[in-house]
Image: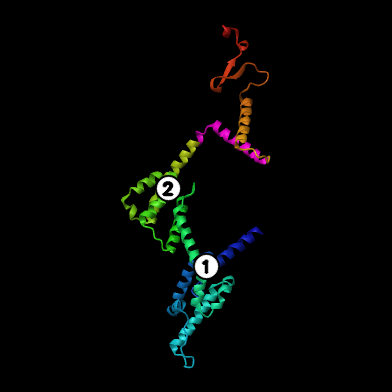
Amino acid sequence: MDSAKLAFQAQFYKNDLMMSLGTNTRPPVLIDENEFTQWQDRFVNFIERQTNGANMMKSLTEGPFIKPNQEIPATPDEVLRIKVDRELSANLMLALPNSIYNRVDHYKNYPNQMWEQLEKIMLGSSVATQLRHTRFMNNFEEFKAKESESLKSVFNKFCTVLNDLRKINVIKTELETNLKFLNVLQPEWNKSCHRLRNDVRISTMQIQELYEILMTDESIVLEKKAKLEKKNKKSVDPVALLMKQLAEQALSDNAYDGSTDDDGEALQKAMIILSQHYQKKFQPRSGSNNLRFTSGFKNALIPIVNPRSLNPRERK
């Protein structure tokens, strides 16, 4: 049942993808409203590839042909224009699903007005445009690689951010783009980034070239990162690790009990648990009086030997 459902979902997604891309004879369909700008580009490309593409684009931008005098028979050119307007309207209807077409069907005989209305609905007013502009700018300024994210993933996301800026006519220089990309990478890339910042080509190379140069260092960077993580893992203080675990346990117990103790009480609880743990670990077992421990200077654990347990020769 699950495999059949997955197969159906895969086929459904494939059909949606084919409809959104269009074919040579059918226009692309606006499946996702968030991809309106991409759909616009595909639709214009589809219109331009048609036999009467030039006249269709003229109708899309200037409006349909209106015959000046209805009493005079139409000339062949006028008949062609009317036919082109109908083809354009039909293509627009095919390209819009019912949920979107219902909002603009009033303009079905005026494809240019339908086109403008679609832009207003999908892209919003001037206020929405300004908010979109601000969001894209913030995405660029606040862009940062996630911990353990691959270089390829960071590069692909960064290119998407740059493409969004180009949509709002914001073009960054090669130097700005390259330095930004180097600055957002993880700390393990510091050595490679420092070398590239001092490269004389940094202000002229394309972002793709910068990415390809970094790719040559990726295996070395990942190897050094793995060795460092392994070293740090070995050098973990067991007492500090135990303290952290006990503190987390106390906090979780505190939350489970539904109490309202503050962090100080939770830490005190963790210290009590730690003290009990040390007592169990270092105090001698019952019935054994050979060794006992006492706290000395700075609470150090000092073993004290029971003289009675020593051999007679050792007592001398």
Tell which of 237 and 131 is nearer to you: 131
Q: Secondary structure at mark 1?
A: helix
Residue of label 1:
122
**In the image, which is nearer the foreground, mark 2 or mark 1?**
1
Q: Which label sits on residue 218?
A: 2
Q: Can you see residue 189?
A: yes
Evaluate whether residue 51 shows in this view. no
Q: Front-most of 310 and 204?
A: 204
**Of marks 2 and 1, which one's residue comes earlier in the chain?**
1
Q: Residue furthest front?
A: 127
* Residue drawn at the location 46% of the way across and 88% of the way down: 68
Above or below, 142 against 121 in this view is: above
Residue 28 horizontal/vertical position (percent): 51, 71
Name, please, the residue furthest toward the left: 200
Q: Secondary structure at mark 2?
A: helix
Q: Is residue 37 magenta?
A: no
Look at the image and tell me in which quarter the C terminus lies.
top right
Q: Position of residue 159 (x, y in %)?
A: 44, 57
Magenta segment range?
A: 233-256
Which amino acid is tagged 2? Glu
Q: CA distance from mark 2 to mark 1?
A: 41 Å
Q: Is residue 127 left or right of residue 254?
A: left
Q: Dots 2 and 1: beta carbons under 8 Å?
A: no
Q: Amino acid at mark 1?
A: Met
Badge 1: residue crowd in 10 Å (few <14, some 14–19, many ≥20): some
